[in-house]
Structures are given as C-alpha cells and as structure tokens.
Amino acid sequence: MPRLFVGLEIPEDVVSALAACRGGLPGARWVEPENYHVTLRFIGDVDADVAEDVYALLAEARARAPVEIVLDGLGCFGGDKPHAVFAEVHASEALVALHEETERLVRRAGLAPERRKFKPHVTLARLRQAAPGDVAAWIEARAPFERLSFSAERIAVFSAREQTGGGPYVVEAAFPMA
C-alpha cells in the first residue's frame, strides 16, 4: 500500500533559499531540501485501486491558471510542545480553491474528509523535545524573512516511505493546471 499525498512541487531557487534556514535548532530533524513541497491533501496508506481512482479523478480536474504561491514567514506547529517548524504559505483565494477542489476529488475516490484545517506551509524540520524558547529564537534569528514566491503549474501525487512517513518523496503522478 502506498502512502500518498497531493501537493505542489517547489522550484529549485525557492528550495535553495529555504535550505538556507537549516541548522541552529536543537532537537530538529531537518527535511531534505529535495523533499520540500506544499501539501494540498494528505491521503495516507491506500491500496493500488484507490490510488488509481485518485489519479483518474485528479486528471479530470478543471483547467485553471497556474497558482501563485507566496511564502511570507516562518512558524511552528505545537505551541508549548513544538513539533515542526515551517515556512508559511499565504492562503490566497486561488490556493484555497485548489485545495478545496482537491479535497472534493479525493473524497469522490472514497476517502474520508480531512479533519484538519488547511494551513498551507512547507515543513522545514520535525522537532523532538525542542524548547519553545529555542524555536522562538530560531525564528527570530531569521527575521525578517525574505518573501519568496513561485508559480505552481501542476499538482503532484507524492508517495512516501511507509515505515516513517518521510522522504524521499517520489512523484507518482502529476497533472498540469492549464
């Protein structure tokens, strides 16, 4: 069973800029830059038939103009128990519409609705026992964050290793937006 998610690939120049943020945070397990992406919808472990249904439905998605993606800051998930640091992605109207359409399509493949609120981001590191103060200092040391942007021209279905849910991620299928 492949572990899948739908997302947006990030161009090399943006990957390089994000990779410059790596380091200096105790307890961080840094995501390899080649695995940076913006998740639209986590699918999880599914059998090959469901995966094929997802591919077919995404292939039928309505044509749309490429979506402008803007990364405009750094943040963390977990509050007093931080578990990840990320680059924030502006939730533009076009990006939210793309997420909503992706959600509708994967639900048509028989998947349960996503329960988590859509918070677009690029995960930079997963944290093990990181102190909130260390995370705040890491974010502050990288301020001001230089705004980054790119045009996402296709969506991709990625697979992840089943054992860890991590990279390396492999593009299993990709679908142009226009």
Image: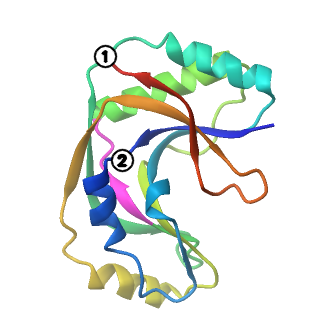
Q: Is residue 104 above or below residue 23?
A: above
Quadrant location of the C terminus in the rendered image: top left
Rendering coords of residue 157 (x, y %): 56, 33
Q: Nearer the viewer, residue 66 or 81?
A: 66
Residue at the image position 57 percent from the left and 19 percent from the top:
105
Q: Amino acid at mark 2?
A: Ile
Q: Secondary structure at mark 1?
A: loop
**Residue drawn 76% across and 50% down?**
162
Q: From where the camera sits, is residue 43 visible?
A: no
Of 11 and 150, nearer the camera is: 11
Q: Picture coordinates of residue 21 (x, y %)?
A: 34, 74
Image coordinates for residue 144, horizontal then vertical, percent: 18, 74
Indicate the quadrant where residue 97 lies: top left
What residue is disc 2 on?
10
Q: Residues within 10 Å of mark 1 (few under 14, many from 20)?
A: few
Q: Does 44 sit above or below residue 31?
A: above
Is 55 positioned to the left or the right of 79 in the image?
A: right
Colour scheme of the picture: rainbow
- Label 2 Cα neighbours within 10 Å, binned few <14 / some 14-19 / many ≥20: many
Report which residue position mark 1 lands on. Answer: 178
**Is-magenta flag for residue 177?**
no
Judge left or right: residue 106 versus residue 174: right
Boundaries of the magenta span: 86-92
- Answer yes or no: is residue 37 visible: yes
Q: Amino acid at mark 1?
A: Ala
Find residue 140 and report its horizontal and vertical position in percent: 29, 82
Mark 2 to mark 1: distance in Å? 18 Å
Residue at 19% across, 59% down: 147
